[in-house]
Image (cartoon, rainbow, N blue to C red):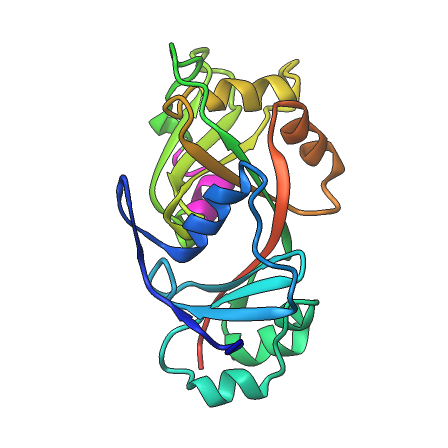
Amino acid sequence: MDPIGRAGAVPGLMGDVHPIGEVLSRAVDGDFPAVDGGWRRVEPWRSGVEGVVAFTGHAYLAVDDEISDGTLSGLGPDGFGGASNPRLVSRLAGSGWIDALDIVLVARGAGGEPALVPRSDLRNHPRAQHATSVRSDVATYGYAAPDDHTLVTLSTGLGGLLEVGLETDPAKDHVGAQVVRDALTLVPEDEVVVAACAPGNARALRAFMAAGFEPVASVQLWRPER
């Protein structure tokens, strides 16, 4: 197997699906990449943002063509942790911003009557600003009460899939899992949606899993300055 095999866009029902979006969509149903220690280079799904998505025994590196195949291969990526090596990530990011290593979780939308409403007043929330820096088409939602600052972001994110993020208002008596369930009503029924959660954020991780999300991979993003 050629470990640096390049993957192009995969035709899908919603147009060209990014290879990482394709593999995450399959993971929802338990169909994972081969556990072969391999890795694959793909084009970034968003201009100015690169990253590594690692599954059990297989990894995907979304890196701009500015980095040659030889340079990338020489950094020693592999599907058994090498593609997420901090030295590799640091080399690719240069002096640019590097995000935390996150767990990737997947679920399907619930559809139906939305449990949340658009909240443009939350657009300047730090979590919304972070989402805007690495995702596209970011929309902010929350509960109708104007004094409730619980935030849900819905955007085009990892691999071109819908991505959800949230932060509950500590002044309100919200259960995290219920906020996640309410967020899923914003996503069309059965459409794949992803979320990223820091491994140490056990409270958020438990909330996503209690609401039906399943962990399938890890992701680390960076905005390169080389």
Q: Start and end of the magenta stretch?
A: 123-131
Hey, which quadrant is residue 90 in on the image? bottom right
Left or right of 168 in this view: 118: left
Left or right of 111 in this view: 148: right
Please count the marks in the image. Answer: 0
Q: Is residue 168 above or below residue 7?
A: above
Hey, which quadrant is residue 175 in on the image? top right
Residue shown at 59% from the left, 24% from the top:
169
Q: What secondary structure is the magenta-colored segment mainly?
A: helix
**Membership of 56 in magenta stretch:** no
Q: Is residue 95 visible?
A: no
Hey, which quadrant is residue 112 in on the image? top left
Q: Quadrant of the C terminus?
A: bottom left
Residue shown at 48% from the left, 50% from the top:
23
Residue extending farthest left: 15
Residue shown at 62% from the left, 45% from the top:
216
Residue 67 x, y percent position in the rendering: 42, 83
Left or right of 209 in this view: 21: left
Residue 197 x, y percent position in the rendering: 62, 43
Left or right of 27 in this view: 144: left
**Membership of 130 in magenta stretch:** yes
Nearer the observer, 75 or 49: 75
Residue 195 x, y percent position in the rendering: 54, 40
Q: Is residue 161 visible?
A: yes
